[in-house]
Amino acid sequence: MEFILEPWPWYVSGPLIALVMFLLLGLGKNFGMSANLRTLCTIGGAGKFADFFKFDWKSQRWNLIVVAGAIVGGFVASEFLSTSSKIDLNPDTVVALKEMGFNNAGDAYVPSELYSFENMDISVVGILLLAGVLVGFGSRYAGGCTSGHAISGLSDLQLPSLIAVIGFFIGGLFMTHVLLPIIF
């Protein structure tokens, strides 16, 4: 008999996320992955190159537990909580992606046309590097990343986080419906 774990439903995982947020807020902590990456960069010596990374990272070492949890949690979810890597996409989305050249839309979490070594050419690497720089600039300019603003900032009822989340959604819609068809 094979035992397969299924992903947790929203009504279990949602309250668990809320519980973690209440605990963090009660302890005076903020959650966000960009803060965790800042801590890692500071440990790696980035403070020699930019003042942004000059801070007492030891006061933020709890962030490293979040990074480890994200890595371990991602592995556990991928290896033990997923029955396949196929994604249930809307048929219209599959057709639109095929028109852009993504032939295996929904067959994997990320498109092999972008993320396989066979398809890595200078234009794909350039697009991915530019995207990474823009995400890094955006999260620094917005004072946090999507997870920090959407989960922690909104939990703390911060107006700047609400504005940032609205901006993230507008940017995502613009990328999906305007820029992505132009690029591909």
Image (spheres, rainbow, N blue to C red):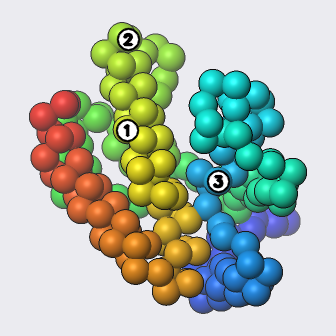
Image quadrant in which you'd find residue 148: bottom right
Residue 35 numbered mark, or none? 3
Q: Position of residue 41 (x, y in %)?
A: 70, 36
Q: Earlier in the sequence, mark 2 or mark 1?
A: 2
- Quarter holding the C terminus is top left
Q: From the viewer's side, name the closer residue of 118 and 143.
A: 143
Q: Position of residue 141 (x, y in %)?
A: 41, 50
Q: Which residue is mark 1?
A: 134
Q: Is residue 112 above or below residue 26?
A: above
Q: From the viewer's side, name the closer residue of 28 and 132.
A: 28
Q: Which residue is mark 2?
A: 121
Residue drawn at x 79%, y 56% as measured from the top left:
60
Q: Earlier in the sequence, mark 3 or mark 1?
A: 3
Q: Earlier in the sequence, mark 2 or mark 3?
A: 3
Looking at the image, can residue 88 be seen?
Answer: yes
Q: Secondary structure at mark 1?
A: helix
What kind of residue is marked 3? Ala
